[in-house]
Amino acid sequence: MYNNASSAGTRLLPVMRYRDVAGAIAWLGRAFGFQEHHVVRCDDGSILYAVLSFANALIMLGPVRSTEFDGLMKQPDEIGGAETQSCYFVVDDAAAHCAAAKAAGAAIVLDVKEYDYGGQGYSCRDPEGHIWSFGTYNPCRASATGDRVRRRNLLVAAALVVAIGVGGWLAVAGQFGSLIETRNGIAEVLAGRQAAATAENEALRRIGQELIEERHSREAVERALVLERSAKVAAERAAEAARSRLAEWQKTRGSDSQEQSSLPGPSKQMQVPKPRPARKATPGVAVRPMSAPAP
């Protein structure tokens, strides 16, 4: 397996395409505070790609071209302003950063608001339609803080259990000091120590079980989100297939209607002559049989 653990720098560089790379570099610096880190130019002076820095993060800008890679991507204005991906950057003051971006001409699509999981943030579009998000919530810092809080709670709980056990033992020793040398007194002291140790082990077991349940709950939520996204994609595909079948059926039905309208109308029914009524026979008179009509 390839190992690049010794390579320096960041491992993740989001790539953004722009029709005017030089203009995008200047605008991103004014609006968001990006700084030019590295620019590579072609022989004709045009920019092949550029790397910009934002605090300790890096992004790469490239021109819109007709390469094999570019054939896999679309600009926002080519798909109704939609974006399939977006970058999120951590800032110290979301409101101040939003004001600077708005002053530089950014189109604010989601104004500054409080996040349910903590912090503030907003989202905006740049001149070529890409969506950027900035906020004060730092997922890495939140994860580290949560780990520290859990470890601290575990140590506090363990300390409380030990303190309770020692206090109980001292209480027993003080109350029954006169009986410590006797067999019954020693048995009670040992029982108190055993109970304290049992309580301590039970508290540690419960804490460990709570940590396991918390991890399982988080994994269940992540699996539910994956299933929800998969169901959404499947529903969209099914809806698209249904629309295609409906359009094909309507097209076929229209063709059948045109063919039926071009056929001649029903022919008039043939007039069948009614048969003549039979002549009544008169007594004593011979009846001559009627001859068949000429064809």
Image (cartoon, rainbow, N blue to C red):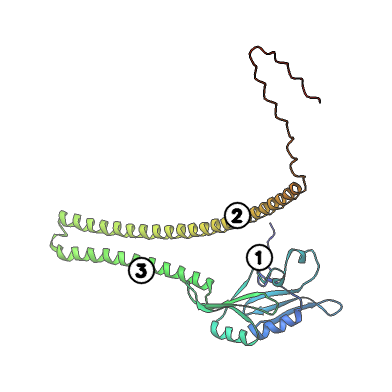
Residue 122 is left or right of residue 34, and the answer is: left
Q: Earlier in the sequence, mark 1 or mark 3?
A: 1
Q: Is residue 93 visible?
A: no
Label placed on residue 234: 2
For badge 2, the amino acid type reads Ala
Figure check: 77 above or below 285: below
Relative to the observer, which residue lies in front, 288 or 11?
A: 288
Observer-side mark, 1 or 2, equals 2
Which secondary structure lies at badge 3? helix
Label placed on residue 156: 3
Observer-side mark, 3 or 2, equals 2
What separation in Å lies between label 1 and label 2 (alpha carbons)? 38 Å
Q: Residue 15 in the image: x percent, y percent?
A: 70, 71
**Going 69% across and 52% down the picture, which residue do you hit?**
250
Whether pointer 3 and pointer 2 mark residues with C-beta atoms closer than 8 Å, the reply is no
Q: Is residue 38 visible?
A: yes
Q: Earlier in the sequence, mark 3 or mark 2?
A: 3
Which secondary structure lies at badge 2? helix
The residue furthest left is 178
Figure check: 60 above or below 165: below
**Going 46% across and 69% down the picture, which residue do you hit?**
146
Residue 182 is left or right of residue 110, and the answer is: left
Q: Earlier in the sequence, mark 1 or mark 2?
A: 1
Relative to the observer, which residue lies in front, 236 or 217?
A: 236
What separation in Å lies between label 1 and label 3 (alpha carbons)? 38 Å
Q: Residue 260 in the image: x percent, y percent?
A: 74, 46
Q: Which residue is mark 1?
A: 5
Relative to the observer, which residue lies in front, 233 or 91?
A: 233
Relative to the observer, which residue lies in front, 188 or 158?
A: 158
Figure check: 186 above or below 132: above
